[in-house]
Amino acid sequence: MKKQLVAVLAAFCLTTAIATPIKSYASTSTTDSSGEVVNEKLGDPIVVYGGSLSDSEKASVKSSLGVSGNSGIKEITITGADIAKYIENGNASARLYSSAKITPKNEGSGLVINIVTPENITEVTSDMYSNAMLTAGIEDATVEVAAPKKVTGHSALAGIYKAYEVTTGKKLDPERTDVANQELSVATDIAQNSNVDDKKVGELLTEIKKQIAEQKPATKEDVAKIVDEQLKKLEISLSDKDRQLLIDLMNKISNLDINFGKWSSQLNDLSGNIKDKLSKINDDIKNDTGFWASVKNFFKKIIDGISGLFG
């Protein structure tokens, strides 16, 4: 009898570990560039390959990004020297597999990020890329990210910097690109260390940056207040370490040479996109009858087990 009671109690304890299933949304479509009308006012589409790719891996990435021999897309490679150029104290010996295709768009079009191999980009989300790219000064482009095997996705950002400069002829501010890279690292750290859903992290970063753009905080204490307000508003709990990392990052962002008036509008667009994704996830959870049926069945088995002990 005692062993059976222990087993039942253990089953009840397991209920605390039931997690709501979160579905990841990342586009698996690619642009058929050969079928597009070329806008001669803009730069050409360009693909940047990770410098560590083997020939077979590069061929796989080409296929994922829709690059063929007659596509007319310029192709370049990111190297360790580029990492050192765009990221302060960047590791020039880093292994580089993440690759991307950049297609410039008309002013005001905003950023569209498609991770075309979502199964292989394991840490960085499309929202994290969007946030970091806005911080770096990249705007009005469609970006497709791919990798031939499982990677974190961090190195794609430096490749995007290089491709953007080559195709648009615009020089990115190295201070902004460095801070943007730090932002990507902080975002993935928070998602992993504090067990915060990656889309919730994207929403948090966007909302804090919106408030920085609107309030223009004068001191680090003002930045900390904004961070704490948004953490409370979004009901996100961080460790002291992650909270401090976030405050330090946002303080750096607040001191960048950014047109915050224009930035605020771009962040509002990004915020709307993230909230739409979160709403879709919630709707899918509510409509996931299979999940709720399994929960009901789980509890029924526990109740039946208890009834068997005392019936």
Image (cartoon, grey):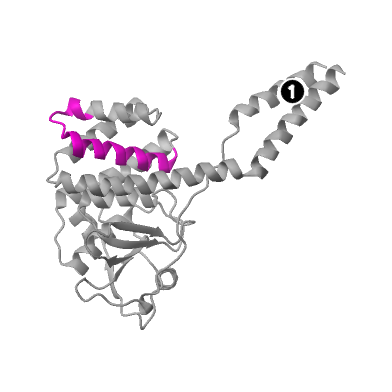
Check the image and report above or below for 198 versus 50: above
In the image as oriented, which residue stretches furthest toward the bottom?
70
Q: Quadrant of the C terminus?
A: top right
In the image as oriented, which residue stretches furthest toward the right?
311
The image position of residue 287, as x and y in percent, is: 60, 44
Check the image and report above or below for 279 versus 51: above
Q: Nearer the viewer, residue 263 or 130?
A: 263
Displayed quadrant of residue 143: bottom left
Displayed quadrant of residue 183: top left
Check the image and report above or below for 64 versus 258: below
Label 1 secondary element? helix
Dot 1 alpha-carbon crowd within 10 angstroms: few under 14, some 14 to 19, many 20 or more:
some
Q: Amino acid at mark 1?
A: Val
What residue do we see at 40% from left, 43% from top? 275
State left or right for residue 257 relative to residue 179.
left
- The number of numbered discs placed on residues in the rendered structure image is 1
The image position of residue 277, as x and y in percent, is: 44, 47
What residue do we see at 62% from left, 44% from top? 288
The image position of residue 122, as x and y in percent, is: 44, 51
State left or right for residue 125 relative to residue 301.
left
Question: Is the stretch drawn in magenta largely helix, strand or loop?
Answer: helix
What residue do we see at 64% from left, 24% from top? 13
What residue do we see at 44% from left, 68% from top? 64
Q: Which residues are magenta?
A: 197-223
In the picture of the structure, the residue carrying the numbered disc 1 is: 8
State left or right for residue 104 relative to residue 294.
left
The stretch drawn in magenta includes residue 210? yes
Q: Is residue 119 visible?
A: yes
Q: Quadrant of the N terminus?
A: top right
Q: Is residue 89 visible?
A: no
